Image: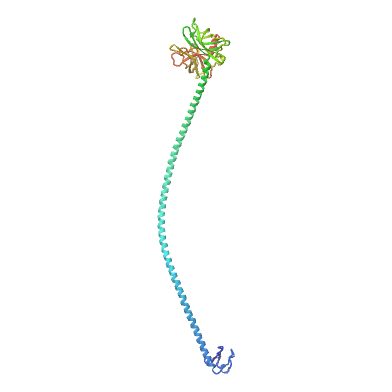
Amino acid sequence: MTSESTMICSKCGASLEADDASSARFCPGCGASFGPGASIGMKLVAAGSVLLGVLVLVGATWRGLASESGETKLLRADVLGLEKKAAGRQEDLEALGKEQVRLEAEYRKQKELLKKKEEELSSCEGEIARLEAANREEVDRASKRLEAVRKQLADSKAVADQILRKEVDKARRKERRIRLMERYRHLCVTLWNSAEEVSSGFLYDAGRSAYIVTSDRIAARGKTVYAKIMFRRGSKYYVMKRSSCRLVRRDVKRGLAFYSPTLPRGATVTCASSRMASGAKAGDEVFVIATNVVGGKVLDYTVHDGTVSAADRKVDGLSYVQTTLPCNPGCAGAPVIDSDGKLIAVLMKALGNLEKSSLAISVDEVAKSLRGR
């Protein structure tokens, strides 16, 4: 606003007081001249300037209002968007709440199931412990049975081994005895006299001569004695079925008789000797190759087994070897041989009425008798 005493330059808009304007002819700002109508123009210019300022202010206000209305709309749109999002979040929260309730119920259910499983597990562990204890007892019993079976097996094996060894030893002894019997068979002799009395005997090396050792039962006075003898020529053996025998010595005390056989020219015989002799021991296995007479029939080269019952049995003042060998008719005078093939005695007679008991004169007594002692 300008007062009536103020002039405004129409060119540059500079104001000038009235006192100065009345006297001034030119504008001090731009140099424009002030005429007589300059005050009205200047007033119009001043009014226009005011109006322009008002318009500018109104325009600015209007633009502010317009701008404020756009921002409000945007804010309202944002608010509506946020409200929608909040509603969505609320729905999500409600869904999460429901899910949480469901999960809590499922958790409680699973917890109950877990508790039941733990109870079942505890029960199973107890059953396992019980079964393990029972199994340990069963295993212990089975182990004891196994040990017992192993012991029985070991005992059975030991018994079987012992039986096998016995059988092997028995087979070996049998094989050896067969060889010995074949060897002694060549020196065994069957004797008989004119009275048809039969006795056993064997050839014995007396040094320069081979004598037949037998029982004196066959050496009755005035009776001729014959012998069945095996002899050898070269590597072959022959049988002399009837050889006349001469009595060399008769020992009535010991019951022995010694004969000298008649042999073919060039014949040699197998004889027992003192080198083949051995002392008897109780329990020794022995055998005898003898002649048996059964029902008037002569069975020569018969083998009997037995053992030595006593090595020094005194009977009627004489020392005998007691055996379990049978002394059947015709067996007296047979050689008694041990398992090593040693000549130990001469079978003489049965011992009373005892079954499987006989007496034999030891080979030492035979040697003494032959020497006349």
* Nearest to the observer: residue 169 or residue 181: 181
Task: Establish if 137 lies above or below 96.
Answer: above
Mark yes or no: residue 253 visible: no
Q: Residue furthest top?
A: 222
140 over 344 or under it: above or below:
below
Q: Residue at image x 44%, y 37%? A: 142
When asked about the image quadrant of residue 210, the answer is top right
Asked if one can make out residue 102 in the rendered structure from this viewpoint, the answer is yes
Looking at the image, is 76 positioned above or below residue 94?
below
76 or 107, nearer to the observer: 76
Residue 132 position within the rendered picture, expressed as x and y whole percent measured from the top left: 44, 42
Q: Quadrant of the C terminus?
A: top right
What color scheme is it?
rainbow
Q: Residue at x 49, y 26 (%)?
A: 164
What percent of the width, then of the height, locates residue 249?
53, 7
Residue 195, horizontal then vertical, whole percent: 46, 7
Q: Residue at (47%, 10%) from the top-left corner? A: 198
Number of numbered discs: 0
Residue shown at the point (49%, 84%) measured from the top left? 55
